[in-house]
Amino acid sequence: MKMRRAVLGALAAAILAAPLLAHAQDYPARPIRMVVPFGPGTSTDIVARVFAEAMSRPLGQAIVVENKAGAGGNIGSDLAAKAPADGYTILMGTVGTHAINPGLYRKMPYDAQKDFVPIGFAGYTPTLLVVAANSPFRTLKDLQAAAARSGGISFASAGNGTSGHLAGELLKARLGGEMVHVPYKEGGLAMSDVMGGQVQFMFYHPAAVMPQVKAGKLRALGVSSARRTAAAPDVPTITEQGYGEFDLVAWFMLYAPAATPASVLARLRDAVAQAVGNPEVKARLTAQALEVPLLKPDELTAFGRTELAKWSDLVKRSGAQVD
């Protein structure tokens, strides 16, 4: 009797597993949806479309980008988190959706760690601390001295809780003095006011600010990452200028819903690896000042935990909060 039950149990398990095995062998059998939790033309959208095109080749199926903007990326991310875990919906996540927002929003519709599994890195970039080219600030010491004077100085960002805002808050803690945060609805508007002298400085992506630096409208004083960036190799890091450990980068990562089968994840991860190894893709990412580290799945998970802890602490110290 025991033997009969064991045989029947094994047979039932095999029957239940058969559809999953067939699914994994056939995957992908139809186009894949890549959710971008920000609008068309944003940096996230640009990176997503590079990977959607490149990954579709080894997968043999089209990857269709679907923009679902709103709530700082939470709407699109929640959509992806609750999609069937079959590999046909993936997400282009960011430092905002998976490291900043959990500390910024009082109520999160998804769990950045539990509801997703990382597929692969899509790139990271530091931000550059920039001032107007005609400003009196030529070094961080100049900013520090101005912040110490009565009235202090101001810094711009693309909005409360963004990586640029939090980088400014960390710099304020390191330099001391008075620095007032001025949030904007859009980074380009903030950059225009920095160039015009209405606001003293901001942290922003190299791809956006370097054309203005080369045009003589902005001056870069520091890099937010632990090492210099190839996009601006002559600009020193904040750390090397003597202001302690300062390592903040904006990043993009592809995710799938947490219960996605391992065999499907393997196909997706292979497609990411092939995309990153493509010289054309590398050139397009370099044009966006992006670097792509090759990390193993467990390293990606560990990176996510470290980033979540780091940015959550910064959000808490900044006092930023979104209802």
Image (tube, grey):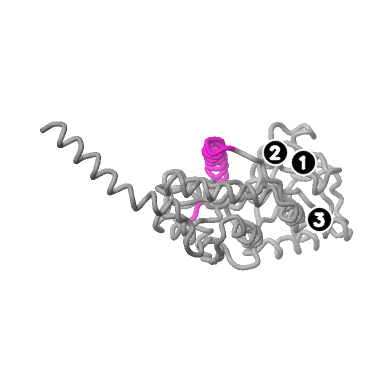
Q: Do the residues labelled 1 and 2 touch (CB within 8 Å)?
A: yes
Label 2 vs label 3, nearer the camera: 3
Residue that carries the numbered disc 3 in the rendered image: 210
Residue 253 picture location, percent across and down: 58, 49
- Amino acid found under the numbered disc labelled 1: Gln
Between 323 and 245, the residue placed more toward the observer is: 245
Q: Give the range drawn in magenta.
A: 296-323
Residue 200 appears in the figure: no
Residue 310 part of the magenta-drawn span: yes
Rounded to the nearest angstrom, the CA distance separating label 1 from label 3 is 23 Å
Q: In this view, does 253 lie above or below 71?
A: above
Circle 1: is it few (<14), some (14-19), or many (20+) Cα within 10 Å? many
The residue drawn where x is 27% and y is 48% is 15
Rounded to the nearest angstrom, the CA distance separating label 2 from label 3 is 27 Å
Residue that carries the numbered disc 1 in the rendered image: 144
SS for callout 3: helix
Mark earlier in primary sequence (2, 3): 2
- Amino acid found under the numbered disc labelled 2: Gly
Mark earlier in primary sequence (1, 2): 1
- Amino acid found under the numbered disc labelled 3: Met
Residue 228 picture location, percent across and down: 78, 40
Residue 96 picture location, percent across and down: 56, 51
Q: In which quarter of the image is residue 214?
A: bottom right
Residue that carries the numbered disc 2 in the rendered image: 176
